[in-house]
Amino acid sequence: MNKAIFVLTLFSFGSHAPLNIMRALFMAEAPSYSSEMDDELSITGEFGMLIAQGNTNTSTLLAKINTSQELDSWSYQVIGDVLYKQSETVIAEQQQTETSAQKIFVSSQLDYKLSEPDQRLFIYGEYEDRRFSAYRYQAPFAAGWTARVWHDSISEFKYSIGPGYAISEVEDRQVMKKV
């Protein structure tokens, strides 16, 4: 059996991780984080590709990104996630390609800081399109109040509460029967 696997991680970085040896080597040229730099942009991302060959040929693509920033009066976070998986099989000497997973997800939260910067008003929205689920898409939206309980250079805890509304479209799957 001939088998090949290929995995690639393109980038993964952030400015708020604890210091260790690998991070020190990776971030040797990066500027250090200072609490005075609240408007510093934080981006964490990942890209992966897996290709396997053998009885079936499979390829998977995965990409994720998480971006956030604290500004004087505003803060925001944007998250994106994409997944695609496809398989090739040979049935009766014919090659068939089949998609087995396909997902697109995007979410964003925008916070307006009140007189106390850890007390905020927020608006949140997300969109998910998952090809093999019961829904064609789902999109919830919410607005309300956020409290940041603690924040330091390596961690943060905050929660949000408020009413929301969701819209979705049910996937119309018609089953065809052979007579």
Image: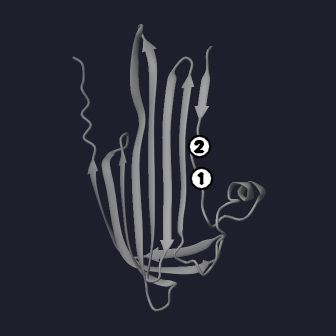
Vertical placement of residue 42 versus 7, above or below: below
Q: Residue pushed farthest top?
A: 93
Q: Which residue is mark 2?
A: 9
Q: Quadrant of the N terminus?
A: top right
Question: Dot 2, crowdedness within 10 Å: few (<14), some or many (≥20)?
Answer: few
User: Which dot marks residue 12?
Assistant: 1
101 w.r.t. 161: above or below: above
Q: Does 16 sit left or right of 133 as displayed?
A: right
Q: Position of residue 118 (x, y in %)?
A: 52, 84
In this rendering, the answer to whether 155 lies above or below 10 is below
Q: Amino acid at mark 1?
A: Ser
Viewer-side residue, 86 vs 164:
86
**Cβ atoms under marks 1 and 2 closer than 8 Å:** yes
Q: Quadrant of the C terminus?
A: top left
Residue depicted at 54% across the width and 17% down the height: 55
Q: Residue at x 49, y 46 (%)?
A: 63
Q: Secondary structure at mark 2?
A: loop
Left or right of residue 84, residue 173 in this image: left
Where in the figure is residue 146, as x and y percent of width and height? Answer: 46, 79
**Percent position (x, y) of residue 127?**
35, 56
Judging from the image, the colouring scheme is one colour
Residue drawn 43% across the image and 33% down it:
100
Q: Foreground residue, 104 or 27?
A: 27
- In the image, what residue type sits under mark 2? Thr
Could you say which quadrant of the image residue 80 lies in?
bottom left
Q: Nearer the viewer, residue 4 or 133?
A: 4
